Amino acid sequence: MNESPEMVDTDLPVRDVVGVGFGPANLALAIAIEEHNMNCAPGEQISAQFLEKQDRFAWHPGMLLDGATMQIAFPKDLVTFRNPRSAYTFFNYLFERGRLVDFVNHQTFFPTRHEFHDYLQWAAGRVSADVQYGTAVESVRGIRNSDGTIDRFEVRASDGTAVIARNVVMGAGLQERIPEWASQSMRCFHNHQFLFRIGELPAPVHQRFAVLGAGQSAAEIVQYLHSNFPEAEVHSVFSRYGYSPADDSPYANRIFDPEAVDDLHGAPEVERLRLLDVHRSTNYSVVDIELINELYAKEYQERVRGRRRLFMRRASEIVSVEESSDGIDVAVRSAVDGLTDTLACDALILATGFTPAHLEPLLGDLAPKMHPPREVGRDYRLAVSPDVTAGIYLQGGTEKTHGITSSLLSNVAVRAGEILTSVVTRRGRIGTLASVNAQDTYATSEAR
């Protein structure tokens, strides 16, 4: 990765891989490239550069709630499923932080979100990747060679700098899903920015908060507000009758296995979509049973003592909001009895999930017509017109083609290896997969 960039007549550096964004997915790719380059001949090294709009590495910092734990086991880190001997495993992080024995004594597979975030920052600071922070990508346009094919891309940043890429790996992440009736403001905001916005909120006047959503993030925020604002009411608004528990049983969890990507990608579309729908309870609008029980116990004890602060607005929806200088009025309609209550709140938190970022703003005419795309190769390469020989790889937004792990951490290690193998193979370097990781259990279908 430290190889001097090749120059073209535009005097711009040329890289084998340019990563758009530097979150966990492209961080895992950067590590895979580093390990590949350490074990291959100099002429077989892959040059790479990553452009990240944030000023430093951060992973959902607005949701680093005290005590919140990960929903995936720590071996599903940046590298272990691809290369358990890597220096970037969560175990090695613990060893270098001096906490390996203490963590083992803790007897858990699920670290806190704070600790896993620290692991990711540790890895980002250690990898020898060329990462340009504070650099937002503005456009990716094809460059045609003398025979008319697009074999490279010009990746241009908002600051005017540019780099030439033989392959672009889109790790632009997710965008917040906001209801049509909502306008984000100081008092109405998505949970993604929760800790920042709640810290800037004026002192509560109404001593009341509303949280919209039925998933893990919504329940965690309800718990946080109830604990940290001991005088305030917290109203949890959701369309279900009650929180539903996440299905984390062993057989259901196989939907997150690396082999499941092979099964789902190769299945007929109707069957793939059926399986994704059947197993939605493993990830979508569900809550850890321990947190459900904790919230239920709090609500029950309040009923016993006669002072209610926690309210579950089940089978309900928010129909309108009206913000004023000292609060926000939230109209909540019950689908059961049709009645509408208007709550004078200090803030409304939208725990309404995410949607894959649209590709068109960056890729222009190269972007697929359908969102999310439905024509993506098993190696995560976007299918484009035949005259495009350069690669566009997707790190996310492939749930409809590759399964639920598309936007989750569960498969980042294996996916990074598969994308790298595809890049290397397409360069004609057959057989270099072994230099990426001789112990790779989950090789790509080409290598099998």
Image: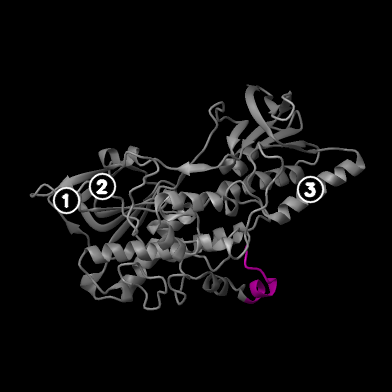
User: What secondary structure is found at the residue carrying circle 1?
Assistant: loop
Q: CA distance from mark 2 to mark 1?
A: 27 Å
Residue under label 2, please give it: 384
User: What secondary structure is found at the residue carrying circle 3?
Assistant: helix
Q: CA distance from mark 2 to mark 3?
A: 50 Å
Q: Residue at x 63, y 56 (%)?
A: 247
| Residue type indicated by callout 3 | Tyr
Q: Is residue 110 magenta?
A: yes
Horizontal and vertical percent for residue 162? 26, 47
| Residue type indicated by callout 2 | Val
68, above or below 332, in the image:
below
Residue under label 3, please give it: 296
In the rendered image, the quadrant that contains the C terminus is: bottom left
Q: Residues within 10 Å of mark 3 (few under 14, many from 20)?
A: some
Nearer the observer, 303 or 40: 303
In the rendered image, the quadrant that contains the N terminus is: bottom left
Q: Which of the marked residues, 2 or 3, is nearer the chain's N terminus?
A: 3
Query: Mark 2 or mark 1, which is nearer to you?
Result: 2
Horizontal and vertical percent for residue 297? 82, 50
Residue extending furthest left? 146
**Segment colored magenta:** 101-111
351, above or below 318, in the image:
below
Q: Which mark is drawn over residue 11?
A: 1
Q: Residues within 10 Å of mark 2 (few under 14, many from 20)?
A: some
